[in-house]
Amino acid sequence: MGSIIDEHGGSDADVKARIGKARAAHLQLRNIWNSKQLSTNTMVRIFNTNVKIVLLYGTETWRTTKAIIQKIQVFINSCLRKILQIRWPDTISNDVLWERTNQILAEEEIRKKRWKWIGHTLRKAHNCVTRQALTWNPQGQKKSGRPKNTLRREMEIDKIRMNNNWIELERKAHDRMGCRMLVGGPCSTGNKRHK
């Protein structure tokens, strides 16, 4: 699907490529950002549908580290400041920026996309490869040292945070309303728009 994965299973190269593609999309819309006829709300909607969607494509399967989340959030904040035409020495806090543009944190958006994808995958047949990959537990000897942050570990941490197990998650995934509650409810870290 156009994702780049390095030999260690990381997503750094894909993040870099996504930011580059989103930056190109943002630059192509330069005339819109400079327009005096369009409202801020319209520009933000255009940003969400033409730039942010390019940036966050495939994030469901990324191994997200704090550094990756920060890179994505910095890019989004930079674009939003350009849309609002806030330039140095004029500044506003990120909280005010997100409130004015009605944005949620990138980390929260990625987490919601991930759990939508997990719900979609859990509704597939048991013999489906993506479903098997989601619940696959490799056997064998573990390497020494600190365990790497993987998509599987992130899902396990979220699952514990939600007080659920895989059986409960599968049950909720088959109930679409339950799945929507799962994505928008306890899995989210609260409404952290203003943190």
Image (cartoon, rainbow, N blue to C red):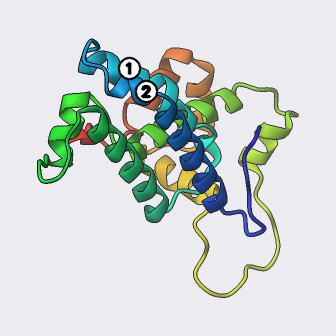
Rendering coords of residue 144 (x, y %): 67, 87
- Kindly indicate the quadrant of the structure image that contains residue 1: top right
In this rendered view, identify the residue nearer to me: 12 or 192.
Answer: 12
Q: Residue at x 56, y 30 (%)?
A: 116
Q: Residue at x 72, y 46 (%)?
A: 3
Q: Is residue 151 above or below residue 103?
A: below
The residue at the far bottom in this view is: 144
Neighbor class of circle 1 (other Cα within 10 Å; few <14, some 14-19, many 20+) is some
Which amino acid, by three-letter code, is at mark 1? Arg
Q: In the rendering, which numbered label is found on residue 48?
A: 2
Asked which secondary structure carries label 2, the reply is helix
Q: Is residue 106 above or below residue 30?
A: below
Identify the residue under disc 1: 45
In this rendered view, identify the residue nearer to me: 50 or 157.
Answer: 50
- Disc 2 to disc 1, how far (Cα)? 5 Å
The residue at the far top in this view is: 37
Rendering coords of residue 2 (x, y %): 75, 41
Q: Do the residues labelled 2 and 1 touch (CB within 8 Å)?
A: yes
